[in-house]
Image: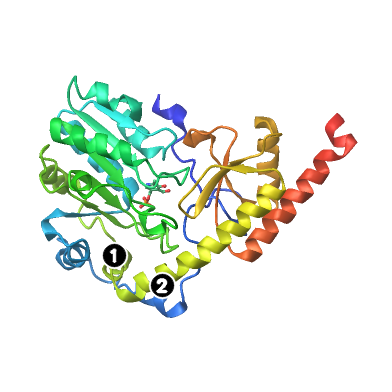
Amino acid sequence: MVSALNLHVHGGQDDGPPIEWDFSSNANAVPLPADLLARLLTADRRLYPEPTYASVRQALAQWHGVDAARIVPTAGSSEGIRRLTLAAFLAGYRQVCVPEPAYGDYRTAALALGMNVQPMAHYPDLILQGPVLLWLCEPCNPTGSSLPADFWSALAHAQRMHPGLIVALDRAYEPLRLQGHDPVPVACAERCWQLYSPNKALGLTGVRAGWMLAPVADQAGLLPSLQHLAPSWVLSAEGVSLLTQWPSAAVQDWLARAHDTLREGLRRQQAALVERAWVHQATCTNFVVSRHPLLDAADLHDLNTFLRAQGLKWRDAANLGLPGWVRWRVHQPQAQAALLKALDQWMALRKQPSRSAA
Ligand SMILES: Cc1ncc(COP(=O)(O)O)c(C=O)c1O
């Protein structure tokens, strides 16, 4: 049942009091310099944006080195996930494979249409039976990890052999890859629908804007449907501004410098948590999943409630498919200090005999 999935559990703002230090979204926490921020948000709100988005599509196409016909603007990847799933449904697709753990919208979009959702590992069997929509996220949310090279070569082979396989590749965190290289072979990427969402890398998640890059050959014929299904003016004026500026040297150079800050912050934040007995899964991005071996689900709930009351929030990863784990992003030193202080306070409270007897 879709309703049981709790559609609106996400990182970031919730309906509680303001969050002073938010570790719970994956957005880049390195602040944009004021001039760049102003440039990114310049928008003329008095007018409708040009409805075909020709110039922003051209700018993005040039950045990718592709034809502008392959760029499909979205109101962010969450909207893109819904629209691509619907287009696949209208093209007769009923089987959807999703990574586990994963961003929940792949699953909820498919379930909302009554499609059959299976774990990603089942796609090689399912494509023998008929058309399949396979969602992948590289690098993956929530773990921040990359799929190995042998997975990608097997997928490239499957793409060649099975034209009914649609691969939707979520690139939300590629611009926040801090280590290693994109493992997706070009031949494989060119057969995927790739979803881009630069608001995370820019720390501007309130701007709802992104794009899909269509595969070189749209074998399932989804492109016309994706265009017809888009609401008029799917991108806001701010969205146009953000996407137009994204390929600029000013933005890309700032992001490259921000990576150095993030790598250092990651090292510091991981080490401080290890000192407190937390263990981490490997990540190549600015976010990590961690658990404390001595904390059960009730402890974790208590800890998260305590942190939230202190104006801090990290992401319980249970509804992302990792019960017992939390996901946190690299934050500024002041935020890190506040988190560590609160963790130490909670641990000290927990050790008090009156509390453990209660
Ligand atoms: C993997 C992944 N894809 C897509 C999204 C949604 O992106 P957008 O803000 O562009 O809707 C998120 C947001 O957290 C995400 O983690």
The residue under label 2 is: 254
In which image quadrant can residue 272 be found? bottom right
Is ligand 1 closer than 8 angstroms to the Cβ of mark 1?
A: no
Q: What element carries label 2?
A: helix
The N terminus appears in which quarter of the rendering? top left
Residue plotted at (58% across, 57% down): 267
**Which amino acid, by three-letter code, is at mark 2?**
Trp
Residue plotted at (31% across, 37% down): 150
Q: Is mark 1 on a helix, strand or loop?
A: helix
The residue under label 1 is: 243
The C terminus appears in which quarter of the rendering? top right
Specify whether 322 is left or right of 204.
Answer: right
Count neighbours of disc 1 (C-alpha within 10 A) and say few if under 14, some if 14 to 19, many if 20 or more.
Answer: many
In primary-sequence order, the first of circles 2 and 1 is 1
**Which amino acid, by three-letter code, is at mark 1?**
Leu
Is ligand 1 closer than 8 angstroms to the Cβ of mark 2?
A: no
- Can you say whether 183 is above or below 161 in the image? below
Residue 189 locus on image (x, y percent): 22, 47
Count neighbours of disc 2 (C-alpha within 10 A) and say few if under 14, some if 14 to 19, many if 20 or more.
Answer: some
Closest to the camera, between mark 2 and mark 1, is 2
Residue 128 locus on image (x, y percent): 19, 21
